[in-house]
Image: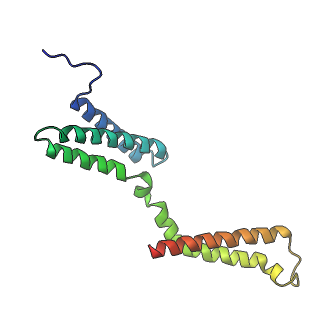
């Protein structure tokens, strides 16, 4: 009987570790409603590394090309999906709402800065209103930029 040194990991152990990491990521993703997204990302990274190691192991074996390809696909599954992609992607949300937000921020900025445009003829506005209006104007510019960048891509 050949003894295997304790520091060498067998393919079965690699597979069980990768499966455990994948199952843990799935459980966290399914039942925590994406509250632990950092932990989900860590477990997915562990699953990806485990499946890639298995793919590399079987790549060097004779007749292991199919298994290597299977493990590579599993690794790609866990490396490309993040909680935000499953939730609806923050960029998609910004892409849909940014034109509305930019118009709203520009309108709010106009309302708050109109006192400065008329030379205080229609009211005595505070300096804070001017600064808030400037902040709204800049936010409107940012959302307009995000919308135009998303539309051009």
Residue beneath the point at 43% across and 45% down = 41
Residue occupying the far front of the picture: 60
Q: Position of residue 47 (x, y in %)?
A: 33, 41
Q: Is residue 38 above or below residue 91?
A: above
Q: x, y percentage for residue 26?
A: 36, 44
Q: Which of 74 and 4 is in front in this view?
A: 4
Picture coordinates of residue 29, whole percent (x, y): 40, 46
User: Where is the N terminus found, in terms of image quarters?
Assistant: top left
- Residue drawn 23% across and 42% down? 55
Looking at the image, residue 117 sits to the left or right of residue 36; the answer is right
The colour scheme used to paint the residues is rainbow
Above-or-below relation of 19 to 35:
above
Tell me which residue sits at (78%, 77%) in the image: 113
Between 27 and 106, the residue placed more toward the observer is 106
Question: Which quarter of the figure is the C terminus placed in?
Answer: bottom left
Q: Which residue is painted at 49% across and 46% down in the image? A: 35
């Amino acid at each position: 009987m050949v003894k295997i040194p304790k520091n060498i990991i067998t393919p079965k152990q690699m597979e069980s570790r990768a499966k455990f990491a994948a199952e843990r990521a799935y459980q966290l993703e399914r039942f925590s409603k994406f509250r632990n997204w950092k932990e989900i990302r860590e477990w997915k990274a562990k699953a990806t590394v485990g499946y890639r190691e298995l793919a590399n192991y079987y790549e060097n074996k004779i007749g292991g090309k199919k298994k290597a390809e299977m493990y590579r696909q599993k690794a790609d599954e866990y490396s490309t999906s993040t909680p935000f992609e499953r939730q609806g992607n923050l960029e998609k949300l910004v892409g849909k709402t940014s034109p509305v937000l930019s118009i709203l921020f520009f309108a709010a900025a106009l309302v708050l800065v109109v006192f400065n445009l008329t030379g205080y003829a229609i009211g005595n506005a505070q300096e804070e209103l001017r600064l808030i209006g400037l902040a709204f104007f800049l936010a409107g510019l940012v959302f307009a930029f995000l919308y135009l960048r998303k539309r051009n891509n």
